Image: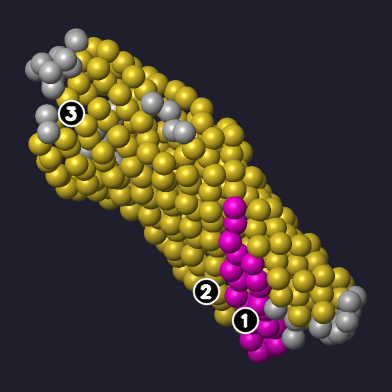
Amino acid sequence: MGPVFGYRQEEIDFGIQSPLIADPNATRENFDTFHVFEIGGDMELLIPCRIFLRGKSTIGFGSSSHAIIEARRRITNFSGMFISEQKFQSRYHASSHTLESFVNIGFPIKISPLTLVTYFGYGYDRENITRKSPPIFNTLEDGLNFSFSPTKNLDFKYYSPLFGIGLHLRPSSCGMFKLMSEYQFYWGILDISSSYKNETSNTTDFIIQKENLFLKKRGYSHRFFIQALLNIKCHLNVGLKLKYQYTSADPNGAHISTSSQELISSNFINQLQNERVPFNKFVWQYLGGEILFLLQF
């Protein structure tokens, strides 16, 4: 057990299209370079040929100056027939808070000096993104002023069972060096929530709609890491870890619900809708490293 200090560079690509979402009904956001600094704790217990226990939890603080949002707006006539499509794109700054936790239990097989470990467990990841000064898209059509903007918060949660397999190399119980390589596979649920604001007005009337979007779908995650530990004393280790994660959403559809509040010429209207949409894109990947100070028993 001991403290962990880390850094990772993330890329998040999130896109959704649904008739449930107020005009524009297709949006995509891309965070090309998210710099996240992490701090946390790691605990590991390995008894060769008996049991392997591990738990870890880290929090992180990130920022990005390369966030891009795109929106598409379908233009129709009074009978609902498609006429044309408008596209909007803008850059903005964003910050984030992250949480990554997991626990697992496994069964090691000792083949000196190697130890093969297979394990099961459960993991929880969360990233709350704050859009700083989110852009506002404006257009004029048939005498109506139309504006669209995302609000400040975008939240991702991923919780899942996991399966892992790893190979540990250590010459002896008090050897000077230990090398670990592991692969983890997650299959669980991805929750996404965001908010958008639309405003349509003319010289006499106006409609302001704030819409909260909730999306739930199955996701898969592949995680790899290589860790090298230098033994200072019999149980005290200092180490470096390289890690990679690729999480994506199941392309077979998602459950989406929206809650919205409309202000139409001083009258409030509340709505709640649900549907299953055919496809939404979500990719969340990172490459990073950690410095560890561990007491291992």
**Which quarter of the rendering shows the C terminus?**
bottom right
Q: Position of residue 229 (x, y in %)?
A: 82, 69
* Principal secondary structure, stretch drawn in magenta: strand
Please indicate whether residue 129 sits to the left or right of residue 192 in the image.
right
Precedes in sequence: disc 2 or disc 1:
1
Q: Position of residue 62 (x, y in %)?
A: 59, 48
Q: Which residue is at the front of the view, 78 or 208?
A: 208
Q: Is residue 277 above or below residue 134?
A: below
Precedes in sequence: disc 1 or disc 3:
1
The answer to whether residue 52 is magenta is: yes
Q: Position of residue 2 (x, y in %)?
A: 71, 75
The answer to whether residue 2 is magenta is: no
**Residue 160's quadrant in the figure?**
bottom left
- The amino acid at mark 3 is Ile
Separation of marks 3 and 2 at Cα, in angstroms: 49 Å
Q: Residues within 10 Å of mark 3 (few under 14, many from 20)?
A: some
Q: Residue at x 60, y 56 (%)?
A: 60
- For label 3, the SS is strand
Q: Which residue is mark 3?
A: 207
- The amino acid at mark 1 is Leu
Separation of marks 2 and 1 at Cα, in angstroms: 10 Å
Separation of marks 1 and 3 at Cα, in angstroms: 56 Å
Which segment did they paint magenta?
40-61
Precedes in sequence: disc 3 or disc 2:
2
Q: Is residue 123 above or below residue 193?
A: below
Note whether residue 60 is visible.
yes
**Residue 184's quadrant in the figure?**
bottom right
- For label 2, the SS is strand
Q: Which residue is mark 1?
A: 53
Q: Which residue is mark 2?
A: 121
Q: Residue at x 30, y 24 (%)?
A: 147
* Circle 1 or circle 3, nearest the eye: 3
